[in-house]
């Protein structure tokens, strides 16, 4: 009986942590390293979205800033300044205007692990 309760609790905890991102489309992934860095996730094809969110896996990441680029040449600068632990996501970030055709998202971040491990950042959109 305890084993069943433990498994049920673990499944519910996982669903509560990673659940919101499952309803979103995965549009890009980037591995990040142990230093302050700037990386870009390129979004393939003409894809229009209203909101984005970044989720972190394997190691925590201190996300500082995002620059979302659109196909029409415009961009949106988003200050995040948030430590995101593995399995957690940023808030849903609304994109200015109607559905926007995203071409790329540039990130300024600092990974916070101490053992030179890599974290994975995934970009979701809806």
Image (cartoon, grey):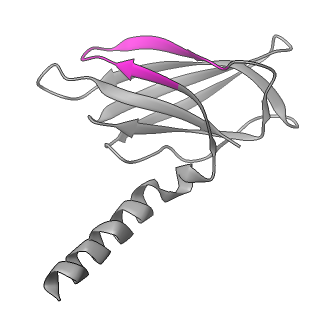
Task: Identify the residue at image location x=49%, y=58%.
Answer: 19
Q: With 21 as the anchor, is 97 left or right in this view?
A: right
Q: Tell which of 21 and 4 is nearer to you.
A: 4
Task: Identify the residue at image location x=45%, y=11%.
Answer: 38
The number of numbered badges drawn on the structure is 0
Residue 91 among magenta residues: no
Q: Position of residue 15 (x, y in %)?
A: 43, 63
Majority secondary structure of the magenta segment? strand
Task: Tell me where residue 104 sits by quadrant.
Answer: top right
* Quadrant assignment for the C terminus: top right
Q: Position of residue 82 (x, y in %)?
A: 41, 38
Residue 38 among magenta residues: yes
Q: Position of residue 57 (x, y in %)?
A: 35, 38
Image: 9 above or below 61 = below
* Quadrant assignment for the N terminus: bottom left
Q: State which region is magenta.
A: 29-43
Task: Identify the residue at image location x=31%, y=43%.
Answer: 85
Task: Tell me where residue 73 sits by quadrant.
Answer: top right
Q: With 36 as the anchor, is 6 left or right in this view?
A: left
Task: Tell me where residue 106 sits by quadrant.
Answer: top right
Image: 107 above or below 99 = above
Task: Identify the residue at image location x=56%, y=24%.
Answer: 66
Q: With 37 as the anchor, is 105 left or right in this view?
A: right
Looking at this rendering, what residue extends furthest in the bottom direction? Answer: 1
Q: Position of residue 118 (x, y in %)?
A: 26, 23
């Amino acid at each position: 009986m305890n084993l069943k309760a433990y498994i049920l609790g673990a499944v519910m905890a996982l669903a509560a942590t990673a659940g919101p991102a499952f309803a979103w489309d995965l549009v890009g992934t980037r591995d990040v390293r142990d230093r302050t860095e700037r990386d870009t996730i390129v979004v393939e094809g003409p894809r229009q979205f209203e909101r984005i969110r970044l989720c972190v896996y394997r190691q925590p990441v201190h996300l500082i800033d995002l620059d979302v680029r659109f196909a029409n040449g415009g961009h949106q600068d988003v200050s995040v300044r948030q430590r995101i632990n593995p399995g957690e996501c940023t808030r849903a970030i609304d994109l200015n205007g109607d559905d926007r055709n995203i071409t790329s998202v540039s990130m300024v971040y600092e990974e916070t692990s101490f053992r030179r491990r890599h974290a994975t950042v995934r970009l979701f959109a809806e």
